[in-house]
Image (tube, rainbow, N blue to C red):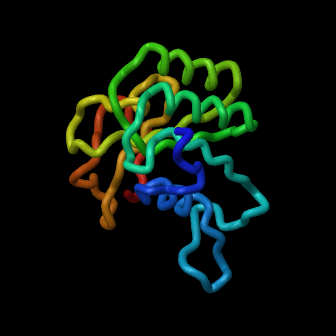
Amino acid sequence: YEDECWSNDGNGHGTHCAGTIGAIGGNDKGVTSVNPDPTKFSFYIGKGLKDSGSGWNSEILEAVQKCVDAQANIISMSLGGGYTYTAKEQFKEHYEDDGVLIIAAAGNDAGSSHNYPASYKHVMSVAAVDINKNKASFSQFNNQVEIAAPG
């Protein structure tokens, strides 16, 4: 989105997810992440949604492509929508040809319906669990979910 800066998260959700992955620990500031050693990873931010949290599949696919072009090994997305053949094929290509692991949130509709991109075969679908490690009341759980994590 040309009129919006990639580093501005007007919705607040993207920075929350990135912080869960990359917050630097052991510095007496805030929280630590799943990987608190900043020498073991780097971020490339591919902004696929507007600050409002909405957007188009084409913009998401463009952001994914930019991440792949920047040599990303893992792409994490916390977003969802409908099925498109173009997206399915692009994610398949990145997985099979580029060796990129694409991870996406299963969805927040509290049911078993499929949410995309998480339900594409070549995307790892992540459901949410609550503080007691039980299925979160809002989380999708379907036959595409491969793993669950606190959400």
Horizontal and vertical percent position of residue 45: 62, 47
Horizontal and vertical percent position of residue 23: 60, 67
Q: Residue furthest front?
A: 3
**Is residue 125 rendered to the left or right of residue 122?**
left
Residue at image point 49% right, 42% down = 77
Horizontal and vertical percent position of residue 70: 74, 37
Residue at image point 43% right, 59% down = 12
Q: Residue furthest bottom?
A: 28
User: Splitting the image into 4 quarters, where does residue 64 fall?
Assistant: top right
For the residue pair 81 and 92, the one nearer the viewer reads as 81
For the residue pair 83 and 141, the one nearer the viewer reads as 83
Q: Is residue 30 above or below residue 94?
A: below
User: Splitting the image into 4 quarters, where does residue 97 fall?
Assistant: top right
Locate the C terminus by quadrant.
Answer: bottom left
**Is residue 66 rendered to the left or right of residue 49?**
right
Residue at image point 35% right, 51% down = 128
Horizontal and vertical percent position of residue 134: 28, 57
Residue at image point 69% right, 28% down = 99
User: Splitting the image into 4 quarters, where does residue 50 fall?
Assistant: top left
For the residue pair 64 and 105, the one nearer the viewer reads as 64
